[in-house]
Image (cartoon, helix red, strand yellow):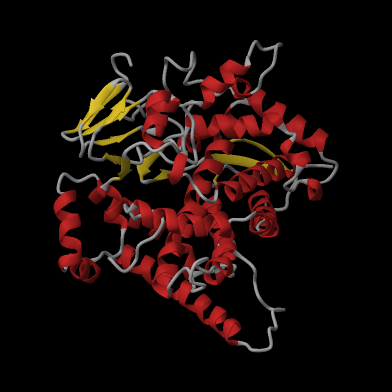
Amino acid sequence: MTLGDAFRYRPDGVLFMTSTAYNQIYGAKKNNVKKSKFYKSFQRNKHFPNVLTTTDEAAHAKTRKVLNSVFSAETVQSAEAFIIKHVDRWCEIVSEGSTEWTEPKNVSAQIDFMTFDIMGDLAFGVDFGTQEAEENPMKAIPETIHGFLKRLNTIGHSPLLGLFVWLKPLGLDVLLQATAPKSVKDYYKFLDSSVGERIKQEDIIASRKDGDSKDIRRDLFHSLYSSKDPETGAPSFSHAHLRSEASVLVVAGADTTAAAMSAILFYLTRNERAYKKVEEEVRSTFTSVDEIRSGAKLSSCRYLRACINESQRMSPSGLTEAPREVLKGGLEVDGTLLPAGTTVGCAAWALSHSEEAYDDPWVYRPERWIVDPATGVTTEDVARAGSLVHPFLIGPGNCVGQKVAMMELLIFVGRVVWRMDLKAGDGKEETYGGGQRNKGWGERYRGSFKVRDAYITLKDGPVLRVRERSL
């Protein structure tokens, strides 16, 4: 560890920015930490634990085991058709069905709508239709989720967090629900109604005696509902627990993916050389857009995957430090023994912009992810770059839906690049997502996509001009 690799960001908390520290804190090996009280601030009440908010290791392991089976290879593959449907619709809407360049448009909200509709299909069996132009009350939900998480993230980093968590089961939960802002109430209303309706459908199917399964929608929610405790044979989740786990699917299944997609389009349209290379790769690999689906052919597009990796490095979809609390006996991190009760973590944005790990951390260079004698990039170089970029975390707390998320990103970028021509907007619209000279320190550099931490990543932009590809 060198000077600057550790930072005391609160009286009882230390952040680190080395790959060694990252593995010691989050790695799968038993590491004498647990999730900090930060996550309890996200818990609706004591009756609504889920795999994200629980700090009990045994409870987390039990739920995670069920979720691992839910996100099976079969379930992941079944998600593909829904992803393709909504991605193709996004392309049609954004291009306006024209081979002429559109006016500059901020595509941030349209990306939010697309990932929200995908999540609705996968998690609730409902196409919310927020991409369409018609009036739709569901269009307010993505922004409602952002407001909800901003509020909870502020509480989670408050110096009064300990008192807040202690008071929650003693009556504070009831008070908070009664006095919650409209955004929070709207979010809970959306969640309860969506899950409640789906539970009714599943209850009816489960009550049948004839075994008829022709209308069963075998999506993520069905897998959650149908999962059984291997020891008792009882349902793994109560109805209340289903509602709570569905909340995780909403956030992880929509917002983080939308942030990643926005960043990718920003960097590709601001780096012409990278854009031309990925365009050439995609359009020479596939003979039609229908071929662009999960499988060996899409996986063979190394430069496409490198562009995704580099975008996630420069503008991570999860900026937070994912705080962990050191348990009794302490924890040694980078040669320093930290006492029990210390909050530790590694902030993704700081890690991925380390000037010691990357010679040019502010440069969008997908080539750093591809071993190639012609560019001088070695296996060791790629490993070093990857040691500090973990968009899905590692260890027991990693993202259970990461295979679905990566499928979504590959299909989205592949189909967008194959179907459309893209370029950055111009004029004053160019500032969305990029830096602005009149902003404060850290917000002036125009070469990086600006993101903000609210546990999820908040963004605005990019502004693009697009047209349908002429074939």
Place residue 185 in its image quadrant. bottom left
Horizontal arrangement in the rendering, residue 45 relative to residue 17 (left or right): left
**Residue 172: where, in percent of width, then height?**
17, 65
Q: Quadrant of the N terminus?
A: top left
Place residue 295 in its image quadrant. top right
Q: Residue at x 22, y 66 (%)?
A: 173
Horizontal arrangement in the rendering, residue 121 relative to residue 387 (left or right): right
Task: Say whether residue 159 is visible.
Answer: yes
**Residue 306: where, in percent of width, then height?**
63, 29
Q: Residue furthest bottom?
A: 209
**Residue 133: where, in percent of width, then height?**
58, 63
Q: Residue at x 66, y 29 (%)?
A: 275
Depth check, front residue: 373 or 65: 65
**Residue 152: where, in percent of width, then height?**
29, 53
Horizontal arrangement in the rendering, residue 340 relative to residue 434 (left or right): left
Q: How many marks?
A: 0
Does residue 126 lie above or below 407 as drawn?
below
Task: Say whether residue 317 is visible.
Answer: no
Q: Quadrant of the C terminus?
A: top right
Q: Residue at x 57, y 58 (%)?
A: 69
Does residue 232 lie above or below 280 as drawn?
below
Does residue 195 lie above or below 373 as drawn?
below
Depth check, front residue: 301 or 25: 25
